[in-house]
Image (cartoon, helix red, strand yellow):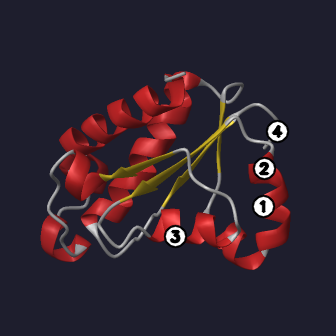
């Protein structure tokens, strides 16, 4: 991931609309800001390799967890390594998303991204702001 980058870690709970939105918004934020300034990782890597990830996170300029709901899984897993997050975004609180099962939220629609477009845009704006804040 590299030293002096901001690292973002979305929760990506694929069972819920808010979890999927964390990942879609995080990817769009990375595209907007650029990989030279921000890195993205997964919680699975933290769970599997906590010591290695701690050393990587210790080098980061800033660590931003992006959680879909008040369960704050991303923040909790990051902080279990002994590293504190610099900023935590919680979509149910910060943009007022309602946490719903993805199949209930989207139903039989095939284009999940289009269905969540408005929420992804709001979440991306928050992530980009957190990345660029000094």
* Residue positioned 36% across, 60% down in the render: 20
Label 4's element? loop
* Tag 4 residue: 2
Is the residue under label 4 in contact with that under label 3 (CB below 8 Å)?
no
Residue 70, compared with residue 119, is above or below; it is below
- Spatial CA distance of label 3 from label 1 is 13 Å
**Which comes before the other along the chain, label 3 or label 1?**
1
Percent x, y for residue 94?
A: 24, 46
- Spatial CA distance of label 2 from label 1 is 6 Å
Residue 39, compared with residue 91, is above or below; it is above
State the mark number for residue 54.
Answer: 1
Q: Residues within 10 Å of mark 4 (few under 14, many from 20)?
A: some
* For discs 2 and 4, the disc positioned in front in the rendered view: 2
Percent x, y for residue 79?
A: 60, 65
Left or right: where 25 falls relative to 57 = left
Is the residue under label 1 in contact with that under label 2 (CB below 8 Å)?
yes
Is the residue under label 1 in contact with that under label 3 (CB below 8 Å)?
no
**Which comes before the other along the chain, label 3 or label 4?**
4
**Which comes before the other along the chain, label 2 or label 3?**
2
**Which comes before the other along the chain, label 4 or label 1?**
4
**Which comes before the other along the chain, label 2 or label 4?**
4
Label 3's element? helix
* Residue positioned 34% across, 54% down in the render: 21
Is the residue under label 1 in contact with that under label 4 (CB below 8 Å)?
no
Quadrant of the image for the N terminus? top right
State the mark number for residue 76.
Answer: 3
* Tag 2 residue: 58
Residue 56, compared with residue 98, is above or below; it is above
Percent x, y for residue 60?
A: 73, 41
- Spatial CA distance of label 4 from label 1 is 13 Å
């Amino acid at each position: 991931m590299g030293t002096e980058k901001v690292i973002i870690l979305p929760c990506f709970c694929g069972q819920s609309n808010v979890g999927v939105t964390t990942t879609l918004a995080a990817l769009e934020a990375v595209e907007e800001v650029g990989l030279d300034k921000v890195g993205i990782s997964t919680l699975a890597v933290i769970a599997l390799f906590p010591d290695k990830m701690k050393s990587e996170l210790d080098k980061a300029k800033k660590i931003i967890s992006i959680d879909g709901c008040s369960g704050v899984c991303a923040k909790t897993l990051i902080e279990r390594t002994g590293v504190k997050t610099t900023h935590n975004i919680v979509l149910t609180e910060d943009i007022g998303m309602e946490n719903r099962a993805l199949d209930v939220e989207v139903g039989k629609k095939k284009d999940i991204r289009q269905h969540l477009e408005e929420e992804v845009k709001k979440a991306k704006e928050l992530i980009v702001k957190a990345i660029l804040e000094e």
